[in-house]
Image (cartoon, rainbow, N blue to C red):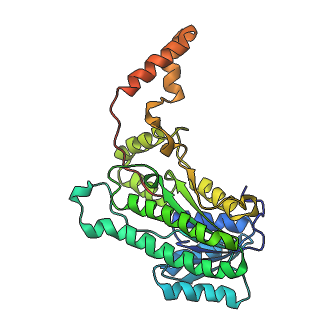
Amino acid sequence: MTNIRILDGAHAVVYGAGGSMGGVVARSLARAGANLLLAGRSLPPVQRVANEIVDGGGRAEAAQVDATNGRDVEELLERVTRAGHSVDISFCLIDYQVAQGMPLVEMKVEDFVRPVALAMQSHFLTATAAGRIMMRQRSGVILSLTATPGGIGYPLTAGFAPACAAIESFSRNLAAELGPYGVRVVNIRSGGSPDSRVFRDAIESNPGAMEQVMRDMENDTMLKRLPAMQEIANTAVFLASELARSITGVTVDITAGTTAALNYRAPRIETLNRLIAPSVSNVGCGLSNLLRTLAAEPAATINPCYS
């Protein structure tokens, strides 16, 4: 889908574009025809992404910007408007410096509060700065990204869970305020992407433990798989386009069904085949008995990773 130029001529600002998810989103927006202004606290990784886009025939510039600094954000957007361009898409994808994997009762307050503060400060500054310009334009799309803990209770996710919930609430409220001006605000909720840097690093450092973690996370989905970064990026391209012109004020769930049901209780196809295939005539009975057995088992505790 991202090879279709449904964003031709649009101007997009992506914060945190040097990260693994930010880079995939930026490349996808560029392939869809958008002009990119890529921002990050550290310039070299952002510049590398911009260079890749330009080498591939796209249009991208890089800038060193702290998304938690209001002056930095305002100056970046002034750079766009001074050049006579519109600000059509704004997407904040910075890192929140999350410490998780420990009970709340054992955490230090600064470790709990830090991701919430970083998430809210960066999203407030980048989204409202873009929103003021978009109000004058009478058009524009503001995107954000959260993860599974934003939609359900999730043990051991520390300050990341309330950060996700806060972003989703902020997105809804901003959408309600900017809607009359023709500006859309949409959040994307991911289930965590196995091909993202945080997953790859965790697997490399502890492959044995992560094999079970990944299996458990996949079992927590309806589709028994997790969304890849490109799936998140494809959704962002669609939501930023005129194809989604009536979608605003919502969180689009791309968790493969994680937040909708107790999916670990539904076995994988290979498990069903192994347990009930020998008696095809009694498939219904066998499935019913299997699900009753699974329902009696205790839930697993899984520590999700943010893409």
Residue 109: x and y in percent read: 26, 67
Could one spot residue 141 in this view of the protein?
Answer: no
View extreme (bottom): residue: 82
View extreme (left): residue: 106
Residue plotted at (54% across, 83% down): 73
Q: Nearer the viewer, residue 232 or 143?
A: 143
The quadrant holding residue 229 is bottom right
Residue plotted at (32% across, 52% down): 156
Residue 103 vs 79, above or below: the answer is above
Residue 118: x and y in percent read: 41, 72
- In the displayed structure image, the side of residue 138 where residue 111 appears, left or right: left
Residue 222 vs 20, above or below: the answer is above
Residue 14 vs 99, above or below: the answer is below
Residue 23: x and y in percent read: 58, 67
Residue 269: x and y in percent read: 54, 27
Q: Nearer the viewer, residue 208 or 182?
A: 182
Q: Nearer the viewer, residue 281 or 260?
A: 260
Could one spot residue 243 in this view of the protein?
Answer: yes
Count of numbered circles in the view: 0
Q: Nearer the viewer, residue 175 or 188?
A: 175
Residue 103 vs 259, above or below: the answer is below
Residue plotted at (52% across, 54% down): 190
- In the displayed structure image, the side of residue 273 where residue 102 appears, left or right: left
Q: Quadrant of the N terminus?
A: bottom right
The quadrant holding residue 86 is bottom right
The quadrant holding residue 164 is bottom left
